[in-house]
Image (cartoon, rainbow, N blue to C red):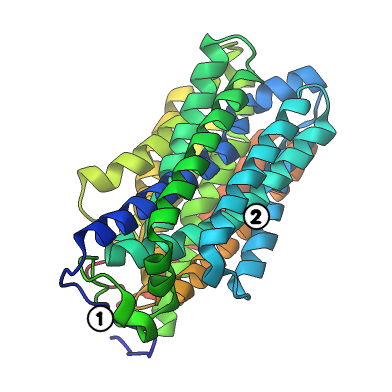
Amino acid sequence: MTERTDSAQVTPSAPTSTTGGRAVAAYGIAATVAFCLLVVGSNIPGPLLPVYRDRLDLSTFTVTALFAVYLVGLVATFTVVAHSRLPRHSTRVLPIAVALVFAGDVALLAGNHSVAWLFVGRVLVGIAVGLGTGAAATIVLATRGERGRAIAATGTLLGSFLGLLASAVVADLLPGPTTTIYCIHMALLVAAAVALAWTHHRSRTTVAHLIRGPEHESAIPTDLPAQADVQRYPRRVRLAGFALGTAGWAIGGVVVGLLPTVVTDMTGSGSIIVTSLAPIVLIGVACAAPRIVASVPSPVSAVAIGVGAVLCFVGVWTSSLPVILVCCVAWGAGQGFAYGNGLKIVTAGLRPVDQGRIASQYASIAYGFTSILSVAIGSIATAAGMTVGLGFAAAVFVVLCGVTIGLGYRRWPARI
């Protein structure tokens, strides 16, 4: 069932320096928070897309392109990170990512009256999240051991939920729906950058040794979490993990990029909270599901995604908001386990630097597919209507989930 590779490693776990261990743990937490804020920034524009569409007179295709251009910057950066030595310099890369998201917020503020600046802001945020994902995955695995292996998945889901919810609530309840939320986010980014710099200053030598690997073990405080001697899964199972994560994340592209506009047209509501219910429910369920249920078999996650895709098509076809929300519950339950489980499968047994590379490669495939699918759906929806576009999406998801289940048939790990 499994094959051993040289990438598995064990780090010491008996304490020698409690202070050193606490400083490293604090840096790991600061890195996690910074990464979550990067993802928050990438999701702030989602609920505002209908506002931008009306204010700037944008077509459905342009709205979709505005969502997808973020993914283009993201995937390009993931590809570079996955084939470079950047994960070795994660402690420098993560602050750069925070600065780029700050610049992206400034551009999005300028985009309040110009769609060109919106595209610039989305690209900058995409590059930042691409850099931050690999950097955070490397840092957190190095500082927290196996508990940090799925941080890219957990941070992505949590950051997505908080970004969507905060954007919708602030836009509805406070003045300046397309400005106030960015100002709040920039203030949080500054605080996160300060915390990141301070905690890194206190632990930089130890963290550098942890990231470099076992050849530097003598300098590592031993009150840190040990990395388990984990075996890699066979290639076919890893391919199933990539497919599972791709299916899990691509649904977010459909829901965040398209459904707020669909619900706006369907309900005629002026409330951004109402028109953003679909992505909020989706990501909220995705975050909550793994906390309510310890684990769900990977094939079940794939089935939930396929069923949700069909329900989405039915909901749009019948103009039924309740059906769309039920679809988002099914999709959220599937995504909550699919993206995280897939990441654990493809990175099992890797060292911190390799974890950063493969986490970037994994996200690159998932987001790249999401970008292509989003643009395709937007093009079809513009030419033939949203119902036809989402019918196409449903067919793609059913096929993708079928392929995923087939790849892992009789080989899925019993426990992840």
Q: Is residue 28 visible?
A: yes
Residue 322: percent from left, percent from top: 43, 24
Q: Residue at x 39, y 42 (%)?
A: 332
Residue 44: percent from left, percent from top: 58, 32
Task: For the N terminus, give its image quadrant.
Answer: bottom left
Q: Is residue 403 visible?
A: no
Q: Is residue 128 left or right of residue 273?
A: right
Q: Nearer the viewer, residue 216 or 343?
A: 216
If you read the primary sequence from the N terminus, does the residue marked by circle 2 or circle 1 appear first? 2
**Which amino acid type is marked by label 2?**
Leu
Element at badge 2? helix
Q: Is residue 24 left or right of residue 75?
A: left
User: Residue 31, relative to residue 404: is it above or below?
Assistant: above
Q: Count the labels in the image.
A: 2
Q: Which mark is residue 346?
A: none
Residue for badge 1: 229
Task: For the C terminus, give its image quadrant.
Answer: bottom left
The reply to whether callout 2 and callout 1 are in contact (CB within 8 Å) is no
**Label 1 Cα neighbours within 10 Å, binned few <14 / some 14-19 / many ≥20:** some
Q: Residue at x 44, y 70 (%)?
A: 208
Residue 398: percent from left, percent from top: 50, 56
Residue for badge 2: 74
Q: CA distance from mark 2 to mark 1?
A: 32 Å
Quarter of image, res 340? bottom left
Residue 17: percent from left, percent from top: 21, 65
User: Residue 401, relative to residue 374: is it above or below?
Assistant: below
Q: Residue at x 40, y 79 (%)?
A: 213
Quarter of image, res 80? bottom right
**Which amino acid type is marked by label 1?**
Asp
Q: Is residue 306 left or right of residue 223?
A: right
Residue extending furthest left?
14
